[in-house]
Amino acid sequence: MAFVQLAEGELHYKLDGPEGAPVLVLSNSLGTDLHMWDAQIAAFTEHFRVLRFDTRGHGQSLVTPGPYSIEQLGRDVLALLDALHIERAHFCGLSMGGLIGQWLGINAGQRLNKLIVCNTAAKIGDPSVWNPRIETVLRDGPAAMVALRDASIARWFTPDFAEANPAAAAKITDMLAATSPEGYAANCAAVRDADFRDQLSSIKVPLLVIAGTEDAVTPPSGGHFIQQHVRGAEYAEFYAAHLSNVQAGAAFSERVRAFLTNH
């Protein structure tokens, strides 16, 4: 296991793929960890040095008092790149990871080669969605995380996928039950408060937006909005709910590879 020391604690990361290859950073969704990308690693490491990390408050990374902000999480990414002496990298983030990607594109584009944001929006939900969830998680702790896990299957996967691939779905949803309640609530606040709708036009790096046709959490309309407000942005949509990288699998990986390698 590998860790980078931040001012407040350790950030857990994993590097795969050939040294010297272009670096591709993968950023997890709210309530998962770096293993949500396991299905992509074999395909991506043929072309890239893949850097995954557990976002603050998730997995084996530091859990600090909340609330967090997307800027704070974005600066964690920059600190990780600095610690590993990576000047520029591709970045692919899903859901909350897509918000982090937008922040990086707006505020630290000089550190990015290309940017991919998946199953996300410039603004996700509103306080009426997030505040009750934060309150419940902080009050009920691990029991609330188990309840969220059980409810997440329907949000993260279409019913046909969950029924045909129960082990794959359970592997991902179990990550939610294992997430620190304090870390999860702090990250919910970061997602709640993020709003990049008026800043998207300042993203100048090449951008691919990926959406899931059946995604009720961040519908395709949110992806279209991002694409329409970033000059030259590309758009792709797969039959999937919220975790398109898991459900679309090989097709997702191939579209990302094609975008990053221009063929």
Image (spheres, rainbow, N blue to C red):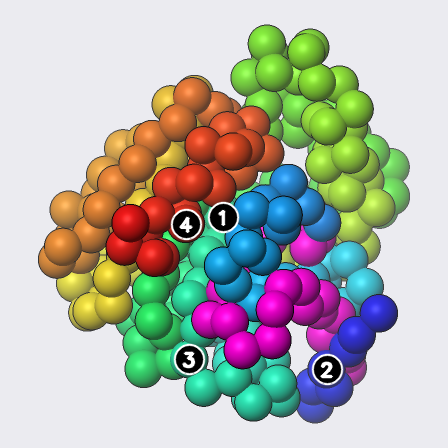
CA gap, disc 4 to disc 2? 27 Å
Give the residue number, with chain letter if any, for mark 2. 4
Rendering coords of residue 12 (x, y %): 75, 70
Give the residue number, with chain letter if any, for mark 3. 88
> Relative to 88, is 146 on the left or the right?
right
CA gap, disc 4 to disc 3? 17 Å
Tag 1 secondary structure:
strand
Q: Which residue is found at the position 77% from the left and 43% from the top?
A: 175
CA gap, disc 1 to disc 3? 20 Å
Task: Find residue 94 and name its label.
Answer: 1
| Local crowd size for mark 4, using a 10 Å CA cut-off: few (<14), some (14–19), many (≥20) | some
Rendering coords of residue 173 (x, y %): 73, 34
Q: Are marks 2 and 3 in contact (CB under 8 Å)?
A: no
CA gap, disc 1 to disc 2? 22 Å
Tag 4 secondary structure:
helix
Q: Which residues are magenta?
A: 8-34
User: Of tags 4 and 3, which is closer to the observer?
Assistant: 4
| Kind of residue at disc 3 | Arg
The tag earlier along the polypeptide, 2 or 3, is 2
Rendering coords of residue 223 (x, y %): 30, 40
The tag earlier along the polypeptide, 4 or 2, is 2
The tag earlier along the polypeptide, 1 or 2, is 2
User: Of tags 2 and 3, which is closer to the observer?
Assistant: 3
